[in-house]
Image (tube, grey):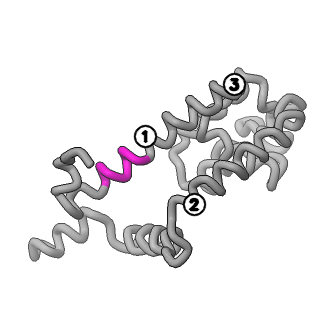
């Protein structure tokens, strides 16, 4: 394997390594969808799956369920709506709120998308040995980080908190 300075940094390089891996997976996902002649983005599966489960959601509800910022959800939704995968309607009880549902185009394409997502899940799962509990470790990392973030942990180590 080629020399990698970031790996040499150990825990200090963790966020960079995770970002690099995420970027590589998203880029590869874009290439995969393009090679299959599909006009979707890798992260859209989140919205598809949420709307399959809940049928109708607002930006605020989607952002809360995904723990994403409103601007990132709005960006995704705008692209999905432009591509014809979402329908929007003003909420009957609150005219300031817009609700989103899957369009007919989305419903028609979901079986193919599900096939791809299942294959993708299996492909990623095979990256890890059976005895490796990576998803459990990732969840533990997320929980611990939510309890005490980088700033707090660093200041604790410096004796400033």
Foreground label between 3 and 2: 2
Q: Position of residue 10 (x, y in %)?
A: 20, 62
SS at badge 3: loop
Q: Earlier in the sequence, mark 1 or mark 3?
A: 1
Q: Earlier in the sequence, mark 1 or mark 2?
A: 1
Residue at x-position 65% and y-position 39%: 44
**Disc number at residue 39?**
3
Q: Which residue is mark 1?
A: 23
Q: Position of residue 25 (x, y in %)?
A: 49, 43
Residue at x-position 52% and y-position 36%: 28
Q: Are marks 1 and 3 in contact (CB under 8 Å)?
A: no
Is residue 20 on the magenta stretch?
yes
Q: Which residue is mark 2?
A: 126
Along the viewing direction, whichever of 88 and 28 lies nearer the viewer = 28
Seen in the image, is 86 located left or right of residue 80?
right
Q: Quadrant of residue 147?
A: bottom left
Seen in the image, is 47 located left or right of residue 140?
right
Local packing at callout 2 (Cα closer than 10 Å; few below 14, some 14-19, many 20+) is: few
Q: Which residues are magenta?
A: 15-21
* Residue 160, placed above or below residue 7: below
Local packing at callout 3 (Cα closer than 10 Å; few below 14, some 14-19, many 20+) is: few
Spatial CA span between label 3 and label 2: 27 Å
Along the viewing direction, whichever of 79 and 92 lies nearer the viewer = 79
């Amino acid at each position: 394997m080629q020399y990698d300075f970031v790996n040499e940094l150990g825990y200090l390089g963790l966020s960079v390594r995770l970002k690099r891996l995420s970027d590589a997976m998203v880029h590869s996902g874009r290439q995969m969808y393009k090679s299959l002649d599909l006009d979707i983005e890798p992260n859209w599966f989140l919205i598809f799956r949420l709307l399959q489960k809940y049928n109708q959601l607002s930006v605020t509800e989607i952002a809360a369920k995904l723990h994403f910022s409103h601007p990132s959800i709005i960006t995704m939704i705008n692209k999905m709506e432009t591509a014809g995968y979402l329908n929007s309607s003003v909420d009957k009880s609150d005219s300031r709120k817009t609700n989103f549902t899957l369009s007919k185009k989305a419903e028609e394409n979901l079986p193919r998308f599900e096939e791809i997502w299942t294959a993708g899940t299996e492909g990623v799962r095979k990256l890890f040995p059976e005895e490796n509990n990576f998803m459990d470790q990732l969840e533990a990392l997320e929980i611990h980080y939510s309890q005490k973030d980088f700033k707090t942990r660093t200041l604790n180590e410096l004796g400033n908190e």
